[in-house]
Image (cartoon, rainbow, N blue to C red):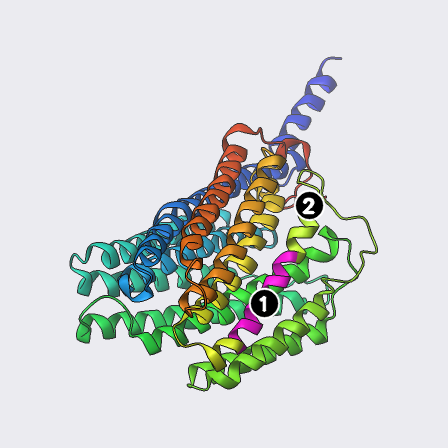
Amino acid sequence: MATPAVTAATISAESRNAPNSPERVFETVRKREEALSHLLMTFVSTGLLFMVFPGTFLGVWNLLQISGRESAASVSQAWLQAHGHAQVFGWVGSFILGIGFYSIPKLRDGANSYLRAAWVCWAMWAAGAAIRWAANIYLWEWRVLLPASATLELAAFAIFFREVSQHRPDPEGKGRLEPWILVVASASMGLLLVLLTNLAACFYVALRGGTPAFPHVFDQRYLALVAWGFLVPFVWGFSAKWMPVFLGLKPFRPRILQAAVVLNLTGIALTVCGAGGAGVWFFVAGSGLAVMALRMFEPAVNEAKIRGVHKSFPLFVRMAYVWLLVAAVLGVAAAGWDTSGGIWGASRHALTVGFVAVMILSVGQRVLPAFAGMRLLWSTKLMVAGLTLVSLGCVMRVSCEVLAYQRYVTWAWSVLPSSALCELAGLTVFAINILGTFVLEPSHAHKQPVMAGMPLKLS
């Protein structure tokens, strides 16, 4: 009579060990989730390292020199460009690649080869950004290192693009990409164009330049491509995806957002072709339509999803879009009245710090803990402290850069160092809070339902 019991136990064990059994599938998914979380935390930690030291700290040093000598021409252009490259590629680029690699696998197979490619991408991207910074600062063999860094960054993006391009829409769905994905795709194409332009410029400077700095006129157009062709559409796309839920807004207006993207692309084309005076008006129009499409300043119809973050989260997100509009308007002012680079600089700072950085500090502390193994944010108090410091520093920097550089008042020069230190403190607090979340907060992934590498809920 014992035989049936043994047979049942054997069958049960074989069922659990079968390749397609629920237990085996669940364990495979769980291991993939852990591997992807580790990958994401590595990309994000790398980005934080670039943000604080090669990026912001160098930016503070540059501004201290400019303020002390009351002249923007007193600082090496190569150092200024090293600061910008570390922020855009080392910080923001690492965040975007990490989140992209983490998000896409939930709808595709081949996890092992995918992870290998992602780690190679990380190594090449980080090496490229670090080499570029070192070449601009130390000038050692920069004619070789500059093209090498640009090649590594482009190759890393090619790996990323190859992997994510294998994603296909859910066959059970409509078979069409959602509108917000198309906006992010346009930003990805903008990043590709930026990397190609950067590669060509690095080879040109290495062969014919006297320093590793890009020529001034070219650099101004290149910066417009970076800011409006890459950074801005990325923020718009992910805002369309997340803000209706996070802020409790009505669904965004796809047609208006698409029109905003078209206007933005027109402004970029005009600026790159040398008609920046006309292009800035398209940036204003595109930004206004984007705000309208995303309903950023419309009343919420549902309760904001602020569990785990500070209650000021919706305020800072909306404040970031105020900075977007300020940056666009300052661009128009710069095209008409700038005589020293101060208004142009203020416009770029309002865009990169006021808009992009504040959005990253707000949304990053909302989603990164969940992506990194369903953790909780280490400190909501540090979150609001960092955002407040960065916002205050940005107000001081944007206003006083116009006043000082344009020689309207002399006291504004003495305020600029304080603005830089304020932003450095805010970004450092952000880095501490994210790293504290990764290291000190326990993972709750085992308590959450997952689907092929992605938590099902971000409530």
Q: Is residue 407 shown left or right of residue 311?
A: left
What residue is disc 2 on? Answer: 312
Please give left or right for residue 398 compared with residue 86 in the image: right
How packed mark 2 is, by other alpha carbons closer than 10 Å (few <14, some 14-19, many 20 or more), is: some
**Mark 1 crowdedness (10 Å alpha carbons): few <14, some 14-19, many ≥20:** many
Q: Which amino acid, mark 1?
A: Val
* Pair 1/2: label in front: 1
Q: Which residue is at a point 50% across and 48% down the rendered structure image?
A: 111
Please state if 286 lies on the left or on the right of 39 as rendered. Answer: right
Which residues are drawn in magenta? 319-332
For disc 1, the marked residue is 326
Q: Give the residue drawn at x 71%, y 39%.
A: 307
Can residue 19 be seen? Answer: no
Looking at the picture, how far across and down is residue 127, in whole percent?
31, 52
Pick the quarter of the image with the N terminus.
Answer: top right
* Amino acid type, label 2: Ser
Q: Position of residue 68 (x, y in %)?
A: 32, 55
Q: Is residue 418 above or below residue 209?
A: above
Q: Is residue 7 magenta?
A: no
Judged from the image, the secondary structure of the residue bearing numbered disc 1 is: helix
Tag count in the figure? 2
For the residue pair 221 and 93, the one nearer the viewer reads as 221
Res. 248 mark: none
